Image (cartoon, rainbow, N blue to C red):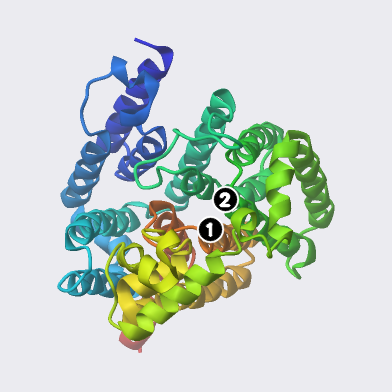
Amino acid sequence: MSKFALLFLIVFAGGIVATLFYSGAASFILYQLVYFLNPDARWWSAGIPGISYSFFCAVLMLGAFALRYRYFSGLSPWKKQPIFKWVLLLLVMYYVVGLYALRPEVHDRFVFSYLKMVIIIAVAYKLLHSRAALHASIWAYIVGATYIGYLATITGRNSGDRVEGIGLVDSPDANGVASTLVPAAALLMYYAWLGNKKLKVLCIICGALIANGLVLINSRGSFVGALVGGGAFLMIMMFSGYRQKGQRAMAIMIAVIGISGALYVADDTFWERMSTLQNPEDKQTSGSGRVDFWLAAIDMTIDRPYGLGIQGFNQLAGPYLGDEFKNKSVHSLWAQGLYELGWIGFVFFVAMLVSLYRISRKARKWVLEKNDITAYFQIRALECGLLGFLAAGSFINQFRAEILYWMILLVAVATNVYFLREQSSQFTKSSVMTMQRRASA
């Protein structure tokens, strides 16, 4: 048995023990780690039992939730979090579109996967009921992203100018893998700023491996997403009216270290590929032809406003774009959601993001009133991580990606932990005091 296989089994067993004897949140954290480790597709998996580890983690989550249903429901009620009604409506739309999808077999298979993901996200929202659980889940993501960066580093470019063959269950191709690393930029900046020296060193190590992974995978969309998400959080750190003493200097230091590290790991192959972003006339090398795909998706939705179903664009790419584009993907989560679910489903998705932003903004105002600056910037970091993924996903089919819904989940958990529960607790205390005053009078 290899060291990787042994380490995986230790982590897996530790996650089970932590779930049973410490916190149900450990089951979702274990699920996150298994997602990135993806043992079924790794070379070291020959040394471990051939079972579905992600399915086992999902069952463990459901069991932990069921055993303490009332407790978790009291801490994290779904009805107070507006995103869940939109997620449910999106799920319903997928089943409705399945009645007339162009590729019904493919549609049904992927919708079942989407259903499982929705259940996992809904249960995880209940389980991640504390600040410690939120931090642990964020670090589980960072550790997983670091592993992908490490895997890309030891694998090297094995398919032309990029790394292939290190994919995840729902993101098997290089672009999909790279997009999962994007939110780490903002989150590592947050922990590097707040952490002690040891944590800062850890963030630098994780950041270096993740950055090197992005360079080796060579995804232009993910490069843009990392710039958008990381850059947005850096600007907030530098120019926010709520920054603390020395925070701007720290932000500048983080920027210098980050840029220096990126320049060090970036090679000529990486810069050659990124330079094609400035060459929109050459559609073969720049990827600017994707705009034609997006416009075609709009035309398809105008003709079929209630959606085409999963891979419906691939089915009609030839008739709309020409035979040379037969069976092509649309390369954008926005266009993907539009053609898969039609105008109604697309509105549901946008409404979900808008509702999440609104409650997140309320949470930011609340923690500022409490002078909880670290919570404020954590919410900001999570928002920027989600923003970065959405930017990267604008060039990749990631509408149903797990990481997208993880980031939505983590922002929602932060709003619950820092705002909804605190607000409810304050309202309860106020009601009790009012009743006591009336009774004494």
Q: Nearer the viewer, residue 83 or 231?
A: 231
Q: Nearer the viewer, residue 157 or 29?
A: 157
Dot 2: element: loop
Where does residue 29 sit, x and y in percent of width and height?
Answer: 38, 41
Tell me whether circle 2 and circle 1 mark residues in contact (CB < 8 Å): yes
**Is residue 177 depicted above or below 348 in this figure?**
above
For badge 2, the amino acid type reads: Val
In primary-sequence order, the first of circles 2 and 1 is: 2
Where does residue 309 sit, x and y in percent of width and height?
Answer: 27, 68
Where does residue 96 sit, x and y in percent of width and height?
Answer: 18, 75
**How many other residues sit within 10 Å of disc 1, few (<14), some (14-19) or many (≥20)?**
many
* Horizontal arrangement in the rendering, residue 143 relative to residue 99 (left or right): right
| Total numbered labels placed on residues in the image | 2
Look at 44% across and 60% down and name the residue there. Answer: 324
* Horizontal arrangement in the rendering, residue 231 relative to residue 431 (left or right): right
For badge 1, the amino acid type reads: Phe
* Real-space CA distance between mark 2 and mark 1, rounded to the nearest whole angstrom: 6 Å
Q: Nearer the viewer, residue 123 or 303?
A: 303
Residue tagged by mark 1? 389
Look at 67% across and 31% down and name the residue there. Answer: 198
**Is residue 380 depicted above or below 255 in this figure?**
below
- The quadrant the N terminus occupies is top left
For residue 182, the mark is 2
